[in-house]
Image (cartoon, rainbow, N blue to C red):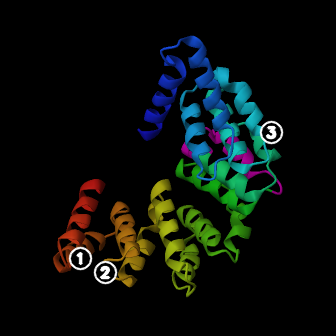
């Protein structure tokens, strides 16, 4: 909704102009386009570029193509995604993905393309088989395919499963668990028992990803994570949410216990909204 309002506002400003006529309107439109292609310290360029992308106007193709040539990561990613959005088949150009040498940028691009439904299943399968593809990108693509009920060669995730990066290893473990590898939960348990400061952040990310991709096999692990977390902590809430979504047997009883023993109105309201949302 916010993006649509921004897009609408930009269209109005670009097309209506001022009382002095069409010349002023054209000048304002040119000024806004120039603003959108400049990097702002407060990241306002992201707002303007998202608004331009929401216009879904093929006539902006020269602008977006120019952005693709930029060295600035955000500009380049906006350009690639915009070209996919205005293309006739709404499809990400895999050649542009291959041109990105930075693994983090590739992962961000592919994830955004999945969210925007710009990556077809055929293209996702092709990406999975790319030699040299970064493990983080491969796991994201695998998650998309598995969530769509597609078959994935589990051996392609072995390197990610062995990673020293807890988030990457945990994500690979969730995909493998959903594929039926029961012992993959051991890796999730290791991530949950980690003593590093970002442990909760990593576990929260995994739980949110499990919900996003509807990995119901993660439900029992999510329930155990909720049991081990402090009663009203964000992690306990996320764990319980995923367990309830996956219809884990103990989840409803755990919800009722937490509701009955909540310390006040605020946690009860959160729990009530949780049950309403899942219902």
Return the x and y of residue 208 as percentages of the image width and height.
47, 62
| Residue stretch rendered in magenta on the structure | 113-132
* Residue 186 found in image quarter: bottom right
Mark 1 falls on what kind of element?
helix
Q: Which of the 4 image quarters holds residue 259? A: bottom left
Residue depicted at x 70% and y 32% = 64
Estimate how packed mark 3 is, as few (under 14), some (14 to 19) or many (20 or more) residues with alpha carbons within 10 Å.
few
Label 1 crowding class (10 Å Cα cut-off): few <14, some 14-19, many 20+? some
User: Which residue has dot 2 on it?
Assistant: 231
Which mark is on residue 171? none
What's the residue at 68%, 46% (across, down)?
Answer: 39
Q: Is residue 159 left or right of residue 1?
A: right
> Which residue is at a point 59% across and 56% down the rendered structure image?
143
Rendered location of residue 200, percent (x, y) = 49, 77
Left or right placement of residue 249 versus residue 220 in this view: left
Please say if 25 is above or below 124: above
The answer to whether the residues at label 1 and label 2 have Cβ atoms under 8 Å apart is yes
Residue extending furthest toward the bottom = 195
Considering the numbered disc 2 on the image, is that residue within a helix, a strand or a loop?
loop
Residue furthest toward the top? 21
Give SS at disc 3: loop
Identify the residue position indicated by label 1 in the image.
Answer: 258
Q: Earlier in the sequence, mark 1 or mark 2?
A: 2
Select label 2 or label 3 by which is in front. Answer: 3
36 displayed left or right of 269: right
In primary-sequence order, the first of circles 2 and 3 is 3
Residue matched to label 3: 69
Q: Is residue 57 visible?
A: no
Picture coordinates of residue 158, whole percent (x, y):
71, 68
């Amino acid at each position: 909704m916010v993006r649509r309002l921004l897009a609408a506002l930009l269209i109005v400003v670009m097309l209506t102009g001022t009382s002095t006529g069409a010349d002023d309107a054209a000048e304002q439109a040119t000024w806004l386009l120039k603003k959108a292609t400049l990097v702002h310290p407060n990241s306002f360029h992201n707002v303007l570029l998202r608004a331009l992308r929401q216009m879904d106007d093929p006539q902006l193709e020269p602008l977006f193509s120019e952005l693709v040539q930029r060295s600035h990561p955000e500009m380049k990613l906006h350009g690639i995604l915009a070209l996919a959005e205005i293309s006739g088949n709404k499809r990400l150009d895999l050649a542009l993905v291959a041109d990105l040498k930075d693994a983090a940028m590739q992962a961000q691009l592919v994830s955004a393309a999945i969210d925007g439904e710009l990556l077809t299943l055929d293209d996702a399968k092709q990406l999975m088989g790319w030699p040299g593809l970064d493990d983080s990108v491969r796991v994201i693509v695998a998650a998309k395919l598995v969530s769509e009920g597609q078959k994935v060669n589990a051996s392609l995730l072995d390197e990610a499963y062995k990673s020293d990066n807890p988030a990457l290893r945990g994500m690979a473990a969730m995909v493998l668990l959903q594929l039926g590898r029961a012992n993959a939960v051991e890796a999730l348990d290791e991530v949950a028992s980690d003593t590093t400061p970002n442990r909760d952040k990593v576990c929260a990310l995994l739980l949110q990803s499990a919900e996003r991709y509807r990995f119901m096999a993660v439900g029992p692990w999510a329930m155990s994570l909720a049991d081990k977390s402090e009663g009203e902590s964000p992690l306990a809430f996320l764990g319980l949410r995923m367990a309830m979504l996956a219809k884990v047997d103990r989840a409803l009883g755990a919800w009722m216990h937490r509701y009955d023993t909540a310390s006040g109105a605020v946690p009860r309201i959160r729990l009530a909204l949780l049950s309403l949302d899942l219902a």
